Image (cartoon, rainbow, N blue to C red):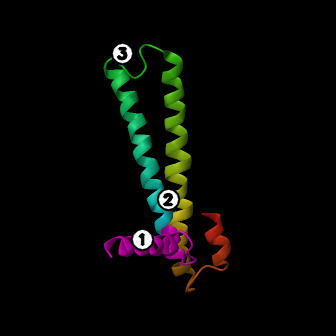
Amino acid sequence: MLLLFINNGRKHFIKKYIYTINHKRIAVNYFFFSFISGLSGAALATMIRLELAYPGSPFFKGDSLRYLQVITAHGLIMVFFVVVPILFGGFANFLIPYHVGSKDVAFPRLNSIGF
């Protein structure tokens, strides 16, 4: 019985947040995606700081090419997977309909596909 409840809850969660056309839930999806991406960017930043504090750390072993790749990946992740989804996806979906005075966005299904 408990397994059936968990399975139904999982289906409800997927249907509720993945297949939604509600602009507020889509904004929450963008915020959650940005949070997860921010954690990976923070892990890369920690690796960079450890290399700068202790040169030849076990992450890079003195390989400067790997260090430059991590710096580039950190920059791209933080800009395109954290900042842009928060600003253009999260805040735009959450705040713009309220500022315009509408109850929902103009094309909710297209907005859902965009995520």
The alpha-carbon separation of the residues under discs 3 and 1 comes to 49 Å
Identify whether 48 is placed above or below 56. Answer: below
Q: Pointer 3: residues within 10 angstroms few (<14), some, or many (20+)?
A: few
Q: Residue at horizontal 50%, vertical 68%? A: 27
Q: Position of residue 21 (x, y in %)?
A: 58, 77
Q: Position of residue 30 (x, y in %)?
A: 50, 62
Pointer 2 residue: 86
**Left or right placement of residue 50 versus residue 37 in this view:** left
**Image quadrant for the C terminus?**
bottom right
Q: Residue at x 55, y 68 (%)?
A: 92
Q: Nearer the viewer, residue 60 or 9?
A: 9
How far apart in space, not on screen, are marks 2 and 1 (Cα)?
Answer: 31 Å
In the image, residue 35 lies at what x, y percent?
Answer: 42, 54
Q: Which residue is mark 1?
A: 7
First in sequence: mark 2 vs mark 1: 1
At label 3, the amino acid type is Pro
Q: Main secondary structure of the magenta part?
A: helix
- The residue drawn where x is 36% and y is 19% is 58
Task: Tell which of 38 and 3 is nearer to you.
Answer: 3
Where disc 1 sits, the SS reads helix
Within the magenta stretch, is there residue 77? Answer: no
Tell me where the magenta segment starts and ends, as one range: 1-27
Question: Sequence order check: which comes first, mark 3 or mark 2?
Answer: 3
Mark 3 sits on what residue? Answer: 55
Q: Residue furthest front?
A: 1
- The mark lying in front, picked from 3 and 1, is 1
Task: Name the side, left or right, on which 49 lies relative to 69.
Answer: left
Question: Which quadrant, please, contains the N terminus?
Answer: bottom left
Residue 42 is situated, as x and y percent measured from the top left of the image, at: 39, 41
